[in-house]
Image (tube, rainbow, N blue to C red):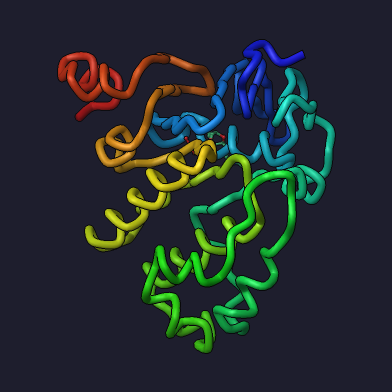
Amino acid sequence: MPECANAMLDVQSIETFYGETQALFGPSISVGEGEVVSLLGPNGAGKTTTIRSILGLTPPRNGRVFFDKKEVTRLSTHKISRLGIGWVPDDRRIFPSLSGKRNLALGARKTRFRSWSVDEMVEIFPALDHLMVRDCENMSGGELQMVSISRALLGAPGLVLFDEPSQGLAPKIVQDVMRTIRRLKGEGISCLIVEQNALAALEVSDRVYVMDRGRIEHEGSARELLDNAPLRRRLIGM
Ligand SMILES: Nc1ncnc2c1ncn2[C@@H]1O[C@H](COP(=O)(O)OP(=O)(O)OP(=O)(O)O)[C@@H](O)[C@H]1O
């Protein structure tokens, strides 16, 4: 059973391996309904592996994952995403030869959570309007990120996993992405953000986990980490 009664996501002591190499040594993470949580830590800490474990891309060998009170540990990635977990991967994973519109159509689905329309996506990212007819192979990093986030939302998620959402983006687009995360929170959608731009992530987060070498090193409120410079420097070096 989930340990945290109202958690949208409840990751319990997962151990994940690549072949015989263990990458995760039992991290436990929860994200409440409408909560925004940051997952920070140095390169190789295990942040992306945690996301891959939740999505069933690299299933944990031990431990359990619950989403929306259902155990998803042994489900296929396809089934997990259909339950309402959206993913904004660090490499965007957009089909380059398809238009923005076709890429968005591939993400559309109904779940028990709020549905989003393409018009709402255009309201959030006005530039998306003229990207609909363009092939994605000619888009900039920021444009691809708008398509990627919109595709995740058209899948009607209850939880969105963001892997390095601001990577390679101009400051204005980073602001747009963070504003979107705030909007999702306002709509009761949960978000888990893996981010190198720790300060931007903390600004929009309720809570934070800091990982190191496959373990949780620190867990607390995002505000505490923003306000406590010595603690922040020790944990995330900034
Ligand atoms: N495909 C893989 N095969 C073998 N080992 C891997 C693979 N992917 C990641 N690892 C190892 O697993 C550990 C955790 O990596 P992971 O990518 O989850 O870290 P991360 O915190 O996301 O780092 P970064 O910020 O650099 O993306 C590292 O030791 C890494 O070398």
Q: Tell me the quadrant of the picture where the N terminus can be found.
A: top right
Residue at x 81%, y 46% (from the top left corner): 79
x then y, percent, for residue 126: 37, 73
Would you identify the image quadrant in which residue 51 lies?
top right
x then y, percent, for residue 182: 38, 43
- In depth, the one of 123 and 27 nearer the eye is 123
x then y, percent, for residue 33: 56, 29
Residue at x 30%, y 20% (from the top left corner): 235
Answer with the quadrant where ligand 1 appears in the image. Answer: top right
Number of numbered discs on residues: 0
Residue at x 58%, y 18% (from the top left corner): 27
Residue at x 22%, y 58% (from the top left corner): 171
> Is 184 displayed left or right of 78 in the figure?
left
Q: Tell me the quadrant of the picture where the C terminus can be found.
A: top left
Q: Is residue 109 above or below residue 67?
A: below
Would you identify the image quadrant in which residue 17 lies?
top right
x then y, percent, for residue 44: 47, 34
> Is 91 displayed left or right of 15 in the figure?
left
Q: Is residue 198 above or below residue 15?
A: below
Would you identify the image quadrant in which residue 42 lies?
top left
